[in-house]
Amino acid sequence: MHPLQSGASTLTERRQLPGKHDQETVEVALAQSGDSRAFERLYRAHVNRVHSLVRRMVPDADAEELTQDVFVRAWQKLAGFRGEAAFGTWLHRLAVNLMLEHRAGLGRDRKRWTSDESAIADQPARRATIDEGMDMEDAVRQLPDGMRQIFVLYDVEGYQHDDIGKMLGISTGTSKSQLHRARMALRQLLLR
Amino acid sequence: MTHHTWTDQLSEYLDGELNATTARALELHLAGCADCRAVADDLRTVSARGRALPELPAGHDLWPGIASRMEAADVVPLRPRAVGGLFMSWPRLAAAGLLLGLASGGAMYAVTHFASRTTAETFPSHQVTVSTARAVADLEMILASEKLDSGTVRVLTVNLARIDSAIADAERALAADPSNVYVSRHLASTARRKVELLHLVAGLTQSRS
């Protein structure tokens, strides 16, 4: 077990709560048959996680509308969901794809993941301690887009680098290096 | 290696993604370098705080907006599976409808008594976001245009109603006993049968138009 795995709640662990899967399978089947009430129950089960993801990945002003977009898109594409992964996994992937479309609509591109490297300057190791009282959410929000999104996907949401690479269209190495830069940047922001 | 090079590898080390040789070399460096140990501790804390971030609920219920957009979008109509002339034959239609009705009624028995044999079923891959009411409306439209005789419409309508009734029964049973896996599976299989019947209706609609 590596140093960060101890005590960590992985994405898989978070999704596989006992009994939840069967219930969700029912709701998905009902929603696929056109039952909007079942889809509403799926919405209520997942909206907080989807909104959290969206809120951390895009500007606050766009978060609620994009969250709505995610569920409307999910309703439209629900027939294509075959149960090969958990519904939440499928929904999250769909949310990420939608946010990438949103980025593209804003005229941003893949260079964002490498061009923002200078935004946070490398700092020499400092003998200081992290301020536990500082708002982590605020610190994450201050990260440049590319770093923030990779930090959110890896550390907050529990995706692995190969998944992130596929979703964002970047190499695994870029994902790893941007994650490290994001953590170093957050360290600087949180240092007292 | 320079001090900076070691620092750059700390995240991969903490994530368990360095090979054993490099990880061991880094650990030897950490043992003698207080600065790098401090950075490693900080990065470990940053990552842990990221994992511990709470959910961020929306400021208000987003469902009304989603529901209205779902309705306004008038989702893609049901598309049939390519099964040739199946839908053209009245006797086969009637038989299929009857089988669906029987299956709906008998599913609870089968699921309860043969639960150990139940396997995960796959869902239809077509867009099936059409309601029973809409399917019935389609049937009525076919009837009005004399594309289908009234007997066929009646059989299909009755079976749709039976399936909806079975779904409602199962939903009530599940509400009373949410952890009952057999009822859950029965509900899922009944919903799937409704989808199959709606496919039948859609195929009929297409073949007669």
Image (spheres, rainbow, N blue to C red):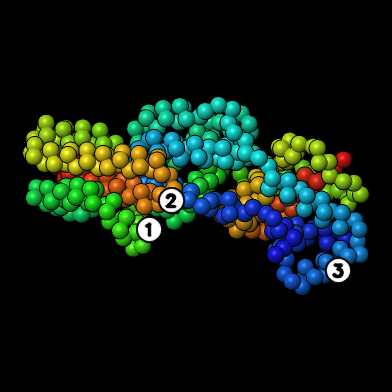
Pointers 2 and 1 in contact (CB under 8 A)? no
Please, what is the three-letter code of the amino acid marked with disc 2?
A: Asp
Q: Do tags 1 and 3 sit on the same chain?
A: yes
Pair 1/3: label in front? 1
- Residue B71 image point, x, y percent: 37, 30
Residue B209 at least partly seen: no
Q: Is residue A49 left or right of residue A72?
A: right
Q: Quick one: which residue is furthest to the bottom in this view?
A: B21
In the image, residue A105 lies at what x, y percent?
Answer: 55, 37
User: Residue A163 — which label?
Assistant: none
Q: Nearer the viewer, mark 2 or mark 1?
A: 2
Give the residue at mark 3.
Answer: B28
Q: Is residue B29 above or below residue B179?
A: below
Quarter placement of the C terminus of chain B? top left
Classify 10 Å Cα crowding around label 1: few (below 14), some (14-19), many (20 and above). few
Return the disc, 1 or 3, that comes first in the chain's sequence: 3
From this view, report whether residue B13 is shown above or below residue B130: below
Residue B120 is marked as 1
Three-letter amino acid code at disc 1?
Answer: Ala
Identify the subunit bearing mark 3. B
**Image mark 1: chain:** B
* Residue A4 percent coordinates (x, y): 72, 57
Label 3 crowd (10 A; few <14 / some 14-19 / many >=20): few
Label 2, on which residue? A22
